[in-house]
Amino acid sequence: MSSPLWTSLMQRVSLLCGAAIFSASFASAQYVSSTTPNSLSTNESSSLQFVSDDGFGGVPALNAAVGALGSGGGRGAGQYERKTGVFSVNHLAFEAGAGFNAPIGNDTPYITWGGNFTGGGGLNFNKRLSLLGEFQFMDNKLPGAFVAAGGGQGGNAHIISLTADPVIDLFPSRVNSMYVTGGGGYYHKSTNFTVEECCDFEGYPVNVTANSFTSNQGGANIGLGLSHRVGGVYGDGKMKLFGEARYVYIHTPAIGQTNGLGTTELIPVTFGLRF
């Protein structure tokens, strides 16, 4: 009689244990699903905290710098480029060169070959167009017949000019290019006849200016040149070697006047560096 009762009791206990196990499993699943994000967040926070506290202070600073570049850095760079404009240091242009001069036209009886020095500076508006303020000094000898007619034993003609000259690069994207230039401005010319006299402090004869003619006139020039770009990783440097020839016209007074020797025409050929 006790056996059926015991069996019934065991069944009821088994049912209660199964229900308890099912309830515990369900509750555990709910707890895990609700606490998993917090755990991940805690782990991530701990990991980040470990990175920031481990002595490598440059990592957060680097991340902040990258963020700044991605957001405001680009705008700041753009504003800087706009502020630099045409008159920034990057747009400044300079040149220096030297060469020789050849007389042409009706000026050949009064002037002969000589040398020149040229220097200047200005602005590069873009890769094609520049504007230079140029200083040029030309030193030419005088023909022997003209020196004798002037009552001297030697002589020279000095020409100093200050001009504004645009330079137009015809092929700005090429390493080897061609350009045109020209302009005008102020020209000062002095023609000097010298005689030899005795003597300096050491007893040597010296050349003394016996007669001189000077004039201050307007003049113009036009020319053609070749350039070769140097420097830069891909041949894109600013520095250029150049060689050019120009025609120079100076409206000096007529030869019959006391302050000049007539119209002057020269071909200065110059080699130099421009950047």
Image (cartoon, helix red, strand yellow):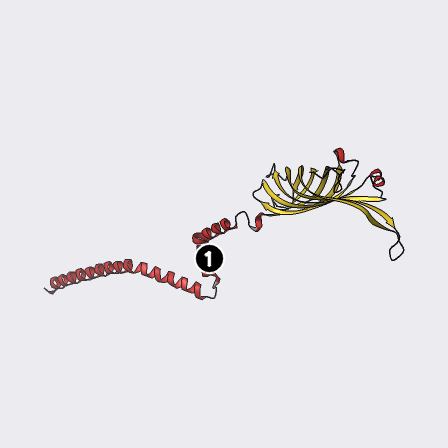
Percent x, y of residue 75: 45, 51
* Number of other residues with Cα within 10 Å of mark 1, as a class: few under 14, some 14 to 19, many 20 or more: few
Q: Give the residue number, with chain letter if any, for mark 1.
A: 65
Depth check: 169 or 203 in front? 203
* Quarter occupied by residue 53: bottom left
Depth check: 10 or 21 in front? 21
Task: Tell me the residue at 71%/42% (across/down).
Answer: 271
Percent x, y of residue 127: 58, 42
Tag 1 secondary structure = helix
Task: Tell me the residue at 29%/59% (across/down).
Answer: 32
Depth check: 67 or 140 in front? 140
Task: Tell me the residue at 35%/62% (across/down).
Answer: 42
Say which quadrant the N terminus sits in.
bottom left
Percent x, y of residue 16: 17, 62
Q: Amino acid at mark 1?
A: Ala
Can you name the residue that lies furthest to the front here?
257
